[in-house]
Image (cartoon, rainbow, N blue to C red):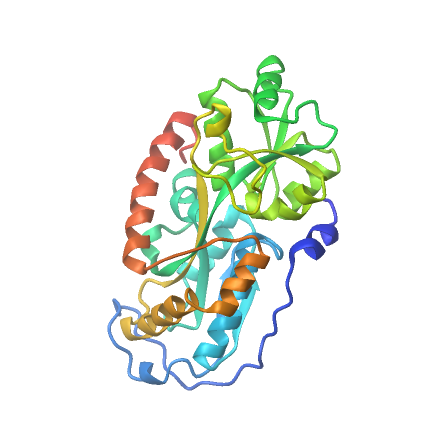
Amino acid sequence: MMKKGKLLTASLLAFTVLAAGCSNSPAPAAGDKGASSPKAAAYPTKAVSIVVPFSAGDISDLATRAFSEFAGGALGQSVVVVNKEGGGGSVGHAEVSKATADGYTLLTGSSGAMGIKPYTANVGYTPDDFKPIGQLVELPFSIISNKNAAFKTLKEFIEYAKNNPGKVKYASPGPGTSNHIVMETLAKKYGLKLVHVPYSGANDAVSVVLGGHVDAAIVVASQVVPQQKAGEVNVLGVTSPKKYEFMPDVPTFGEQGYELDASVWFGIFAPKNTPDDITKVLIDTMKKSSEDPKLKETWKKLSITPSYIGPDELKAKIAKESKSNLEIIKELGLEKK
């Protein structure tokens, strides 16, 4: 495994976590389907944890830490980020799905771990095990290659892969992630035979490209802005319909004649039985965060365009994406046994 120091120093911001207080708030009954809790009016009375299911320095981690700083001030309690990586995000999701539904353990959910992993592996949870609070960010993917790779454009990549079946190795943050499915969709669409090399996070995936250990990687575009600006990697294109504002000189797939419109999102979730009056506090806090000037400036430093949507819209989005993802998963032969 490559060291991640170079990538972390290129993108990590320092966030201060306040000391946690204590609480006597009782947890809701196991069968509570979201009813009011006796002391919800006082919520929170101790530190709130947000589980990030990917490694430190991943865009989900950076976005969550930015949000947690705002939320800590708004809620008057510490909001602590806890990284629980593994299984393409499924380890952290599974843990939170079984956590006490009292508002003190939350999750940064991802589009892949919510709308893909439950259909490709026995992960122990489904999207119905969570109550959406809201979407934080949504970003396009990009395919990158080493500066000395045999291809420097998307067209060259596709032609090289066609002429060398089974030779091109690409890295992703993990099996069954959105990144993995998007790359396999591209391969199927254009008749490519690629070798998937999964890692435990985007930083590792970028590191092995920089080190020349794989030919390419598919990552969230914001994660390679520093490397692209420094000329350390070739960014072959972005998967959004419009140009990515932080890489204005990188063409979209569509501009290069290839059809692929895909993105990744991250949002905040609570266990499904969390009382409604507690989730209302969290929803209000998240909505306020989307309008905060200081947080908007932080998003800009992280090369993120914020894209808040509320819980109802996010729930509908997950249902729609899950349906379309399942069709692709079946076509690719990746459905769980």
77 vs 335: above or below: below
Q: Is residue 136 left or right of residue 234?
A: left
164 vs 271: above or below: above
Q: Quarter of the image holding residue 249?
A: top right
The reply to whether residue 201 is visible in this rendering is no
- Please identify the quadrant where the N terminus is shown: top right
Residue beneath the point at 53% across and 19% down:
192
4 vs 280: above or below: above
Residue beneath the point at 61% across and 74% down:
16
Q: Quarter of the image holding residue 260?
A: top left
Residue 284, image x and y in percent?
A: 34, 71
Residue 107, image x and y in percent?
A: 45, 61
Q: Is residue 201 left or right of residue 92?
A: right
The residue lying furthest to the top in this view is 163
Residue 322, image x and y in percent?
A: 34, 42
Q: Which one is nearer the viewer's eye here, 181 or 32?
A: 181
Residue 134, image x and y in percent?
A: 37, 60
Residue beneath the point at 52% across and 69% down:
294
Q: Which one is nearer the viewer's eye here, 239 or 166?
A: 239
